[in-house]
């Protein structure tokens, strides 16, 4: 059994505020890399996810089945595996890729599966009669998507897409495993210098929390903007 002696508990052993403040600048050096990987990965995920959603919704089996397989496979396997395969495996077949690019590619291709399902459901939420009306007006498939369907679906998609991005922002901590100098990587360096892992990791957690709060405010702004005329 594991025993906990309450009398021996000292807050300073869990979190040393002074040590946290002293090492905060080092940990903050990882913020640009964290944001870069998250944003670039999300953009890649949005682009891939949009076309995956269209393929997934297609009546053509040669488009639908590969999209279904990709989405199922990516959602059913750990993202850390992709990071290792891309960063450590690609060089074995002659493809050299740096850590940041490997992280963006790994997070982007993985998040695309989740984005695809969100976009698919958002597009499906638009009344089917609008497709028929667009055809009657002579709009092409892509013109209907661009001018009629996507603007309406965007309002529905923003909240779940924002949640995917926030999850992606936190998941970038896995990029420390392939030497990307993001927040957790810097916290590990600080922990090695101070021999105080608990303080450094709690500090890193607080930085991640601050970033998610910042992007949550932006999410709320977008939601209010797109709901203005509803």
Image (cartoon, rainbow, N blue to C red):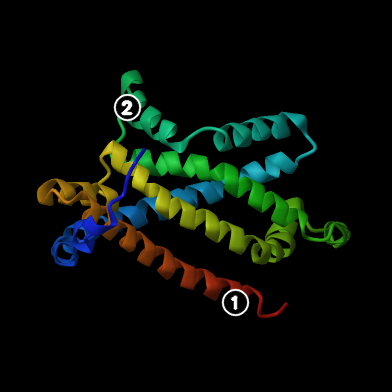
Residue for badge 1: 225
Instruction: Kindly identify the residue that appears in the image at 70 percent across and 33 percent down.
Output: 63
Instruction: Kindly identify the residue that appears in the image at 65 percent across and 52 percent down.
Output: 119
- x, y (%) of residue 84? 37, 30
Q: Is residue 210 above or below residue 89?
A: below
Instruction: Kindly identify the residue that appears in the image at 55 percent across and 35 percent down.
Output: 74
Q: State the quadrant of the N terminus.
A: top left
Instruction: Kindly identify the residue that appears in the image at 77 percent across and 58 percent down.
Output: 125
Left or right of 116? Residue 182 is left
Real-space Cα distance between discs 2 and 1? 43 Å
Label 1 secondary element: helix
Residue for badge 2: 88
Could one spot residue 14 in this view of the protein? no
- x, y (%) of residue 167? 48, 53
In this view, the residue farthest toward the left is 193
Name the image quarter holding residue 89.
top left
Left or right of 88? Residue 151 is right
């Amino acid at each position: 059994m594991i025993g906990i002696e309450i009398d021996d508990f000292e807050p300073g052993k869990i979190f040393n505020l002074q040590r946290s403040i002293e090492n905060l600048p080092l940990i903050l050096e990882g913020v640009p890399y964290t944001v870069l990987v998250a944003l670039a990965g999300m953009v890649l995920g949005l682009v891939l996810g949009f076309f995956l959603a269209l393929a997934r919704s297609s009546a053509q089996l040669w488009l639908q089945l590969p999209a279904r397989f990709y989405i199922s496979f990516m959602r059913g396997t750990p993202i850390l595996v992709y990071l290792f395969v891309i960063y450590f495996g690609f060089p074995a077949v002659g493809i050299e890729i740096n850590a940041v690019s490997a992280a963006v590619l790994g997070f982007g291709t993985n998040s695309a599966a989740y984005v695809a399902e969100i976009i698919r459901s958002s597009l499906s939420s638009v009344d089917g009669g609008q497709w028929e009306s667009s055809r009657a007006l002579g709009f092409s498939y892509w013109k209907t998507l661009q001018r009629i369907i996507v603007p309406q679906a965007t309002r529905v998609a923003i909240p779940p897409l924002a949640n995917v991005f926030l999850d992606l922002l936190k998941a970038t901590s896995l990029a420390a495993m392939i030497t990307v100098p993001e927040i957790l990587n810097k916290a590990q360096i600080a922990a090695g210098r101070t021999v105080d892992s608990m303080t450094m990791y709690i500090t890193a957690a607080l930085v991640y929390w601050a970033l998610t709060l910042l992007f949550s405010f932006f999410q709320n702004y977008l939601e209010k903007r797109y709901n203005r005329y509803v």
